[in-house]
Image: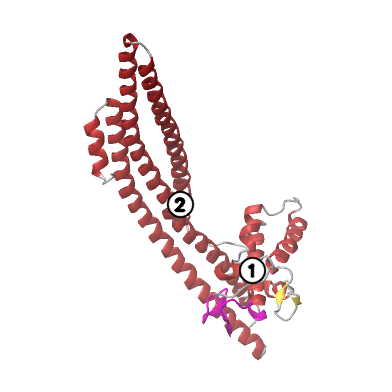
Amino acid sequence: MTSEQEGSSVELSVNGENHQPSVPAAEEAVRSLESKAVSLDGSGNKLSPENRRQIQTMGLPPASRQLGTSGKIMAPTEGHQQTVGGVGSGAAVGGGGPWPLQSVRQWGYNAYKCTLQLVSERLGRATRTADLETEAAVAALRESRRRYEALLNLASALTKHFQAMCDTQRVLADAFLDLARQEPPALATDFQQSADSQRALQRSGEQLLVALQAFCTALSTLVNRTFEDALRTVSAYEFARVEFDAHRGDLDALSVRPSHGRTGAEVAKAEELKRQYEIRQQKFEQLRHDVRIKVQFLDENKIRVMQKQLRLFQSAVSAYFSGNQEALEAALRQINIK
């Protein structure tokens, strides 16, 4: 059975006048293809939760991922014509209205084709487009993000512990000062000196704490914004690759059939398949270029940010533990931390 025939078997039930799908087409496709995968490879292994989440969102436009509790698929902002999987639905939809049935059908068919492509790749029945250079860059990006996230967790833990130490020093200084007022002069002087020492340590610690918090803030921005922005582009690239391979497989299957004796409808279908293939190819190549640019910019930004923050961190920590108050204040002024 070809992917077009399999895709045509996906039916969306219509409930009510708003024409909303009762069951998402992608979930139907997952269950159907899982059963086929089990019968084909005999291993009994089903799709992993990560693959299931990827399949469920395949072909779904960003605005249509915002599902309410009622399960209705809502349209994007006003005045935008909806395009599903690169194919225009031909209907302009207003803001907040339900998706046209044709758009939902097209999305379901596109999701089914991409699901079939993923399962076929998993079973070794379909080929995938491989770009070793880009895939190596993506793997390095994910590993770098994992390491910087671990560094952020450690720096955050250090900041929390140091905050607790500063709080303890403040309470200890208050206790020493209280005893200095109550004890006889023989002990009062020593208690007063101890209180002053803890106060000085606390003030220096709070200055170091400001530097640690600035270091954590910079790391958090790098991990949760810069890296995430690049990884979103990577996700779009990976999905475009699956779409491209799915349409390439359809075109390859059509090319092995004899061209003579085709009806007008079959010729039109072949032309449409070729057009959709070229659209996916252009999208895939553009996103591959975007991924390379994002990775390059991320590396440059990472070097610039981390050089500045590591120098601050080193200067502040060295000045604090050496007892150099002036150097600690200079380190904070260096990046305009008040």
Q: Position of residue 290 (x, y in %)?
A: 42, 64
**Residue at figure coordinates x 78%, y 57% from the top left:** 39
| Residue 82 highlighted magenta (yes or no) | yes
Q: Is residue 139 above or below residue 203?
A: below
Q: Helix, strand or loop at disc 1?
A: helix
Residue nearer the viewer, 3 or 102: 102
On the question of residue 179 being in view, the answer is: yes
Q: Is residue 19 above or below residue 211?
A: below
Q: Amino acid at mark 2?
A: Asn
Mark 2 — residue? 224
Quadrant position of residue 178: top left
**Residue at figure coordinates x 42%, y 29% from the top left:** 165
Q: Helix, strand or loop at disc 2?
A: helix
Answer left or right for 37 relative to 317: right
Q: Amino acid at mark 1?
A: Ala
Pointer 1: residues within 10 angstroms few (<14), some, or many (20+)?
Answer: many
**Residue at figure coordinates x 46%, y 44% from the top left:** 149
**Residue at figure coordinates x 62%, y 53% from the top left:** 50
Mark 1 — residue? 111
Single out the mark in the foreground, 2 or 1: 2
Q: CA distance from mark 2 to mark 1?
A: 29 Å
Answer left or right for 36 relative to 245: right
Q: Which residues are magenta?
A: 77-103
Residue nearer the viewer, 303 or 5: 303
Q: Is residue 157 above or below residue 276?
A: above
Quarter of the image where the C terminus is located: top left
